[in-house]
C-alpha cells in the first residue's frame, strides 16, 4: 500500500517552475510555491517610461490639427483650474491660521462692556487719548469716515497706519502722562479682528519697555466695537460725535 503511494507520487507531473529531476519532497516538509516563469515579464517585455512617452507623443501627433488645438485648450484650462484651486486652498489655510492667532490673542485680553465705559464717562467726563485715566484708540480705516461718528476724545490710528513707529509714538505719549493713563481701550467696527489684534500687539510692545519707573496701562478691547456703541449711544453727544 505504501509502496503504491510512493510510486504514484513519483509519476506526478512536476508543477510549474519545478524541475523534472527534483527529488521527491520529504515527509512533513511543505513545498514552496514558485511562480510560473512564463507569467513573469522579462525586462525586454516591460515597457519603459520613455517608451510610453514616445507612444503618447506619437498618438498626439497622429491627431488632426484641430483636435490637437482643442486638446491643448482643454489641458490649459485644466491646469488653470488646478492652480486656482491650490491658491484658494492656501488662502483658506492662511485665513484659518490668522483667525486662530486672533482668537488666541483675544483670549489674553480684557474686554470692556459699553455700559461700563458709558458709566465712567458720566462720572468722569469725556475720555481722552492718553491724558485721562481712561483712553480710547479707534483703529478703523475707511469705515471711520463711512460710518460717521466716533467716541469723543478718542485717538484715531487706522490699522493700516498702526506700524512700529506709530506704536512707539503712542508709547512716548503714554510715558509723558507720568502714569495718569490707567486703561487704554482699543476698538474697530465690531472689535473682532483689527481691534483685538492691534490691542494684543500693543500690549506686547508695552512689555518691552526697560524703564523700571514706567507703569503701563491696562490694554483692553471695547466689546462689540463702534457698531454696538453707536446703537446704544443713540445720538447722545456725550457718547458719540457725528462728523
Image (spheres, helix red, strand yellow):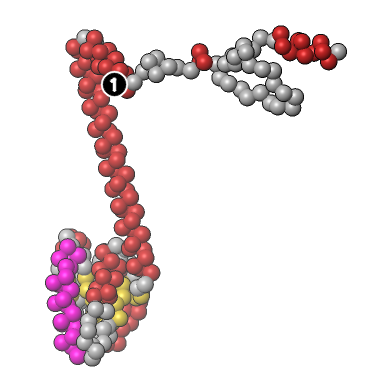
User: Residue 125: which quarter of the image?
Assistant: bottom left
Q: Which residue is nearer to you in this view: 136 or 65?
A: 65
The image position of residue 212, as x and y in percent, is 24, 89
Query: Who's the residue at 58% across and 21% down the image?
Result: 34
Q: Which residues are magenta?
A: 158-179
Which residue corresponds to mark 1? 50
Whole-percent x, y for residue 63 in the image: 24, 10
Q: In the depicted view, which residue is nearer to us: 104 or 137? A: 104
- Residue 3 found in image quarter: top right
Name the residue located 21 percent from the left edge and 70 percent from the top edge: 138
- Crowding near pointer 1: few (<14 within 10 Å), some, many (20+)? few
Residue 236 lies left or right of residue 5; in this view the side is left
Q: Quadrant of the C terminus?
A: bottom left
Task: Assign a secondary structure to mark 1.
Answer: helix
Residue at point 31%, 58% (across, down): 98
| Relative side of 36 to 175, left or right | right
Q: Is residue 59 left or right of residue 166?
A: right
Q: Residue 143, image x and y in percent?
A: 20, 61
Task: Point out the image quarter for the N terminus.
Answer: top right
Is residue 178 in the magenta section?
yes
x, y percent for residue 131: 19, 85
Instruction: Please say whether residue 218 is visible from this viewpoint.
Output: yes
| Residue appearing at x 19%, y 90% in the figure | 178
Q: Give the quarter of the image for residue 122.
A: bottom left
60 over 135 or under it: above or below: above
* Residue in the foreground of this view, choosing between 209 and 15: 15
Q: Is residue 199 visible?
A: no
Amino acid at each position: 500500500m505504501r509502496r503504491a503511494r510512493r510510486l504514484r507520487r513519483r509519476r506526478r507531473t512536476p508543477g510549474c517552475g519545478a524541475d523534472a529531476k527534483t527529488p521527491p519532497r520529504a515527509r512533513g516538509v511543505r513545498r514552496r510555491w514558485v511562480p510560473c516563469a512564463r507569467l513573469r515579464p522579462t525586462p525586454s517585455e516591460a515597457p519603459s517610461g520613455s517608451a510610453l512617452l514616445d507612444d503618447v507623443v506619437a498618438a498626439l501627433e497622429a491627431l488632426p490639427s484641430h483636435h490637437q488645438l482643442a486638446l491643448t485648450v482643454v489641458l490649459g484650462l485644466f491646469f488653470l483650474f488646478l492652480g486656482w484651486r491650490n491658491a484658494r486652498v492656501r488662502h483658506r489655510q492662511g485665513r484659518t491660521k490668522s483667525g486662530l492667532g486672533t482668537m488666541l490673542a483675544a483670549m489674553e485680553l480684557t474686554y470692556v462692556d459699553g455700559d461700563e465705559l458709558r458709566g465712567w464717562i458720566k462720572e468722569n467726563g469725556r475720555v481722552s487719548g492718553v491724558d485721562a485715566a481712561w483712553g480710547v484708540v479707534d483703529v478703523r480705516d475707511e469705515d471711520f469716515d463711512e460710518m460717521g461718528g466716533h467716541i469723543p476724545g478718542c485717538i484715531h490710528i487706522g490699522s493700516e497706519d498702526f506700524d512700529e513707529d506709530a506704536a512707539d509714538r503712542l508709547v512716548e505719549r503714554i510715558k509723558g502722562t507720568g502714569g495718569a493713563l490707567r486703561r487704554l481701550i482699543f476698538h474697530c467696527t465690531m472689535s473682532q479682528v483689527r481691534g483685538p489684534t492691534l490691542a494684543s500687539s500693543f500690549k506686547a510692545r508695552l512689555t518691552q519697555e526697560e524703564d523700571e519707573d514706567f507703569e503701563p496701562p491696562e490694554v483692553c478691547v471695547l466689546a462689540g466695537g463702534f457698531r454696538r456703541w453707536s446703537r446704544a449711544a443713540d445720538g447722545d453727544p456725550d457718547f458719540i460725535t457725528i462728523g
